[in-house]
Amino acid sequence: MSGLSEPSAVGAEEPPASGLPDPTAPLTATGSLRRRAAVSRALEVTATGSALLAVAVFCIVIYTVVSRGAGAISFSFLTTDPTGIGTGGIAPAIVGSAVIVAIATAIAMPLGVLIALYLIEFAGRRSGRVVRMALDLTNGLPTVVVAIMVYGLIVVGSGDSAIAASIALAIVMLPLIARSSHQVLLLVPGTLREASDALGVSRWRGVLGVVLPSALGGIVTATILAAARAAGETVPILLLSSLVTSNDVQINPLHAVSAMPLTIYTDFNDGVPAAVTQAWGTALVLMAIILAANIGARMFLARNRSRLGL
């Protein structure tokens, strides 16, 4: 009859009544899937190439500094005072850098930890957002801007000094320590705070006796990394502690002291081949100190994490 449909062929597959694809059917690559796979491979190759490029640049820097500065390294170079252009050692620069960075660390570390504790324990949503934004903006400030500000507030009228350079470096270090300590304090388990509250311990005693000891390893690591970065800063030292009047070792922070970045700058500007070689040697010493500090900080952090079971 014309009004009846013809029966389907035996064995022919009919589409599901719901119109959805058959989940038991084999998967076939579509054009969209192949395009996404190609984009994924391209991004993977690009990311791998970028990582290899960063490692290559790092190796080139190390090779260049080592090859040009190794000839100047000796025991007397590290322990004696400079005697002229391209002669003598860099003992005053090493001691001066240590004095400036130590004072900057003593200023920045307590303030940074207190800011991190405020963000974790006491700040509201709005005030915490404002503080975090201020830290990020401070971290993005060029060091020359910080140096000029400190120059106008301290150096003008009183002269160059190590304490002025330390204050500038402390401003550079502060957001690094605060943000890193904030992230470390976030990792402290909340059960420790709850246990402290359950024992009736006051808020500040719980913070000092429970929270801070648990995060001490990460805070120390953040401080070491921030100090390593500050040790290589040049602009604050050039503007705030460059009027050195003696080639001897100076530790008085109220007067200008020599520093390794300042020595590198002045030796290169002298143009004498012996002075340039000394500049490369000083750069090698500074780079070795910074690398050792970074590696030591990361080893300390890994050991602390394994002790805490993180």
Image (cartoon, helix red, strand yellow):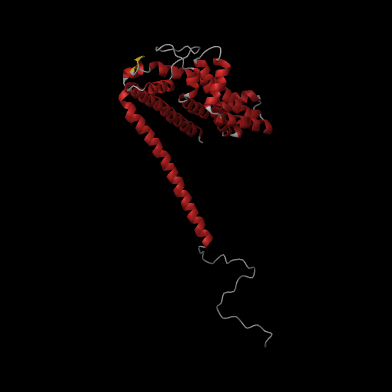
Residue 154: tell me if it is visible.
yes
Residue 43 drawn above or below residue 298? below
What percent of the width, then of the height, locates residue 41?
46, 52
Which quadrant holds residue 65?
A: top left
What percent of the width, then of the height, locates residue 188?
57, 32
Quadrant that contains the N terminus: bottom right
What percent of the width, then of the height, locates residue 193?
62, 30
Image label count: 0
Residue drawn at (65%, 31%), measured in percent from left and top? 130
Residue drawn at (58%, 23%), measured in percent from left and top? 111
Describe residue 271's horizontal placement relative to residue 129 as left or right.
left
Residue drawn at (32%, 30%), measured in percent from left and top? 67
Residue 173: tell me if it is visible.
no
Q: Considering depth in this image, is 275 or 226 the residue closer to the camera?
A: 275
Residue 258 drawn above or below residue 42? above
What percent of the width, then of the height, locates residue 40?
49, 52
Residue 231 drawn above or below residue 161? below
Residue drawn at (34%, 26%), measured in percent from left and top? 69
Q: Considering depth in this image, is 308 or 67 the residue closer to the camera?
A: 67
Which quadrant holds residue 171?
A: top right
